[in-house]
Structure formats: structure tokens, C-alpha cells
Image (cartoon, rainbow, N blue to C red):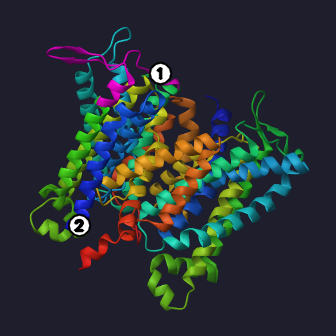
Amino acid sequence: MSPPREQADAAILVLLAAGAALVPFTLSGYEIKLATTITIQAGLAVALGLVVGPAGLISMGHAAFYGLGAYLLAMAAPQSAAADLLLTLVLSIAGAAAFAGVVGAVSIRSRGMYFILMTLAFGQLGYHVFHDTGIAGSADGAYVYFRPELNLPWGTVSLDKPADFYMFVWVVVFAVIAACWWLRRSAFGSILLAARDNEPRTRAFGYSPYLARLIAFVISGAMAGAMGYLTAAQHGYVAPEMLGWHASAIALVMVLLGGKDMTSGPAVGAVLLLLAEEMLQRVTEHWLLGVGLIIILVVIVAPQGLVPWAATVFQFRRVRHA
Amino acid sequence: MSAFFFFVQLLNAVQYALILYLVASGLTLLLGIMGVINLAHGVFYMVGAYIAYAVVQHFAIFWLALPVGILIGLALGALVEKLLLSRLEGADHLSQVLLSFGLILLLNEAQRIIFGNDAHGVDVPQSLSYSIPLSDTLSYPVYRLFVCAVGLLFIAAMGLMMAKTRIGMMLRASAENRDMARAMGIDVQFVYLGVTAVGIACTVLAGVIAAPIASVYPGMGDTVLIQSFVVIVLGGIGSLGGALAGSLLLGLVDAFGKQFFPTYAGFLVYAAMIAVLIVRPQGLIRVRGA
């Protein structure tokens, strides 16, 4: 990425973080809950963007890691008391990372459309495990009866108030986004880019494209698991559909909508898609029609995503070519 | 397990496999010849089933749904190629995946607006609504045999077309080497249009003839779509013969899996696909553009 575009990327992220930090002070009630959902989805989209963008892997199974993270909380939480937040969060992340390790180790050997179909198959496998076998409520889903509590050295913090929970979500999500931003700029990010653009040459330099991609995939899967955990904690309910391929496709839509080549792209994509959904839902019960049209339009008009597209419109590129 | 019961299951497996083949053959041609991943393929199966439902509702003649379905399928396919896919040439798989996902949302919602959320049944046409008795307790519905007949006819027609006709030759040439085919004077754009239109029409037809067997409901194309992907990975992308073999295998796994391990039938299918891709990461047959 050229310096001006990198600056724009960082600027958008700082603006997003600052804007999101104002939410509990300016909004209330339903709007805070909506902001919580949007923030979590932005985290998921940025995490997925790490594998779609620099690693060049189109994962159609990321919802499986997201859903697994959610289910692990539902299964680990006691029925009559609040779970320990940090302990269960670590469990969800570790579980999602382990599953992503297995899926990645096997799938990354396949390229192109085979990788897409492989991750799709793994995602559906995960969906059917929770839908058919009855390990956690089957098709009916499972409940998290009490929102987990934060046990800190100086006492227990309840996150029952929407504003408090939102602040916790903000911290986790922007930690994830910052990590993705740093990873993309790091030497590791450069290896991923090199492997995506010229695999034989990367190998000749002594790097393993397979290993680099696998590491990115596991990190991204672990982050997706954390986002699933947050969703389960927010709604107190998990369902097998969280793992299905429709959910994976929606996450990909957010990545492409904003732009996969910048860290800020998927985050912006998530915000725009969910706000558009919210507005369409207020107008019509057939809001999915609008979402479908938006997706088709963006793919045809701005296949690089709206953030780079806007950057072109605002002539950022002129600086780059100067 | 009696021999008759086994025989009935076998027939069910073959019948389901033939429906799956109708769907998968279009999907595999789109992938093999155009390199397009069409997630919306399953939705067109649903469109076919709803066409059967609507035609039977309004005209009470099931047979009318066959030509209507094929015509609507051809028109929809041509529209999808001209308006959407043709704009994506040279784009990556991500664009195709998302474009077709947008199409799924669009068509699913259109279905909800027109038909609502209820599941519907379509009556088996009068002329075929009887069963052949096999034993005292078992019998086999003739309509399912009709579905098998349509499937076999389709296999024969596709096979002949691919092997013997000029169109088949153009298809094979375009799949093998797009640029060379173009240089030899083949109108590749026209081939793409034809493949998309015919591929989607086959899927719509599959939905029409499956409607009296399966109930007609929103999202019914999802299972068929994912299973068709499994079929074409098993059989090798772009290969019609492979798709047939894959369909039969999946039909057997599905029919007998549901009988013997009802809980695990759902993911046996995906486990099979993952197993194949572990052994052969680029599919059973290597194809250009994959």
C-alpha cells in the first residue's frame, strides 16, 4: 500500500474508534444494542479481511469459527450463575483457533475454487454437528442464562447494563482491529502479500507460503471465535444458523463491500451493511430484497470495495501517481 | 431388511441422484467452462418447484409446468449471463460468490413476496398417481419412475450432445482452452450465454419434476446446492460423467444414510467431500482455470 493510502487507512480506523467510543455517551437503549451488534460484526469482518486480503484466501467457512466461539460459551456457562468472562472468552478463542487450525491445515493445500468449496464443506459440517447431534439444543439452539461477569483483582464487574457491555465489546473489537492493522503492516503481512502475488519467488526467498497462510487463518479464526463469544454474551442465545454458509457469505459481503485490501475496509463495510439493513427493515419487511440489490450493485460498480472506490473519487490516487 | 425394502431404497437413491445430476450438470459446466462459482444455482431449483406449484394452482395441469419451467429457466439464465456474469469476466471468485449470493437474497425475497412463507404440496399428476405393488406392504409410486425416466433421457441427450454435435465440440473446446477456442473462431461469448441459459434451465426443470415428491418451501434449494457442489468435487469439475458418478454416490449415501444413521446423514456428505479433497487437493480431475 502506498503511504497516502496507508495514512487514509489509519485515519479511517482512528475515526471509527473515536466515533464508536462516543456511543455510550450520546445514544441510549436500542441504539446502544444496535451499536454493539455493528461493532462485533465489524470485528468479525476485519478478522476475515486478514485472510481474504493479504492471504488471498476466500474462506466460505468463517461463520463456523464464529459460531463455535458462541457455542463454547453456551456450553461452558453454568445454568444458574454468571460465567467467568475472561476464562470462558479464552476457552472460546482457543476452541475456535484449534478448529481453524484443523480446517486451515487441510484446506490451504487446495487453491482457488477448491479452497472455497473446502471451507464451505467444513462450515456445513460444523452446522450439522450443532443442528443434528443434540450436543447443545440441536435445531432449537442453546441459551446463556446469565451474561458472563468480569472478575478483576479488585472485584467483580457486571456487564448487564447495555452501555457497560458495549464498552467491553469496544475494547475487545478495537484490540482485534489494531492487531489486524499491525499484522498487515508487519513483516509477516509482507510475506502473506508476497505469497499471494508470487508464490514461487516467496518460496525461493525461504518463506513457506503454506505456513504463513495457516498462521493467518488460525489468528483470523480465533478472532472470529471471540466475536461469536461476544454475540452469544450479548443475546444470551446461540443457534446453529450462526455456523451456516449464509452467515459466512454475509461476512464476506462486509469484507468486499468496504474493500479487502485495507484494514479499515471490512470495518466500514460492516457498518454500512448493517446500517443499510436497519434502515431497510424500518421501511419494508422485504428488506432482504434491498440487501441483495446493494450487494449486486457493489460487486459490479465497485468490486475493489467502497473505501478504495471513495478514495479514487476523492483523488487520493493522484498523490500516489505524482 | 427385506430384499424389497433394499430395492425400494436403491430406487429412491437412483431417483434422487438423477435429480441431483440435473442440477449438478449445469453447475459443473458453469464451473468448468466459465470458471464461475454460482451459489445461486440452488435458488433456481426452488424457482422450478414454485413454477410447478403456481401452474398446478392456476391451470391444474402439471404437464404444462415442464415447458413453462424450461422457458422461464432459459430466460432467467440468459438474463443472468447478459446482465451480471458478463460484467464479471476476469474478476476473481470472490466477486462471483458475492454476486450470486446477492442473487440468492433477491430471488428468495421475491419468492416470499409472491408465495409467502408457507410450505406447499404439489399433487402428483393424475395419469401417474398410482403405485406398483412390490409385496404385501411395499409399493413403488409410478411418478418416481417417471422422474428416473426423465433423468435417464437427459443423461442420454447430454452425452450425445457433448460427443456428437457441433455445440458439444464448441463446449469442449471452450472448456479446454478459452483463448485458443476464440482464435479458432468460436464465439465464446455465445457459448457462455448458452451454457448459463441451459444450465439454469436444467436446474429449473429439476425443481419442477421434484415438486410433487418433495414439498415446496422457501430455502429448499440450499441442500441441493451444497450437495451439488459435493457431487462436482467428487466427480471432477467440468466433467459430466464425473457429475453422474458423483450424483449416484451421493444419492446412495443420502438414501441409505438417512435409513441407518439418521443423525449423521447430514454431515456424512460433507465428510466425503473433505476426504476427497484431502487426498486430491485440486479435485479428482484437474481443470484449467480452477
Question: In the rendered view, would you say B27 is above or below B87?
Answer: above
| Label at residue A4 | 2
Q: Residue furthest top?
A: A80
What crowding class fits label 1: few (fewer than 14 Cα within 10 Å), some (14-19), or many (20 or more)?
Answer: some
Answer whether residue B239 is visible to the viewer in this image: no
Q: Farthest residue toward the front?
A: A26
Q: Secondary structure at mark 1?
A: loop
In this orientation, does residue B104 appear?
yes
Q: Amino acid at mark 2?
A: Pro
Highlighted magenta segment, given as a residue range: A140-167
Q: Is circle 2 on the same chain as circle 1?
A: yes
Please report the residue visible at 51 percent of the width from the left and 81 percent of the height from the top. Answer: B173
Question: Mark 1 is on which residue type?
Answer: Gly
Q: Nearer the viewer, residue A218 or A42?
A: A42
Of the pair B65 and A288, the residue shown nearer to us: A288
Q: Is residue A155 left or right of residue B6?
A: left
Q: Position of residue A70 (x, y in %)?
A: 37, 29
Q: Residue B274 location in percent, x, y?
A: 38, 47
Looking at the rendered image, the quarter that the C terminus of chain B falls into is bottom left
Badge 2 density bin: few <14, some 14–19, many ≥20, Cα 10 Å: some
Q: Nearer the viewer, residue B157 or B63?
A: B63
On whether residue B101 falls in the magenta region, the answer is no
Which residue is labeled 1 in the image?
A137
* Subunit under mark 1: A
Query: Residue A229, percent across and down?
Result: 34, 30
Pointer 2 with pointer 1, Cβ within 8 A: no
- Provide the secondary structure element on which disc 2 rests: helix
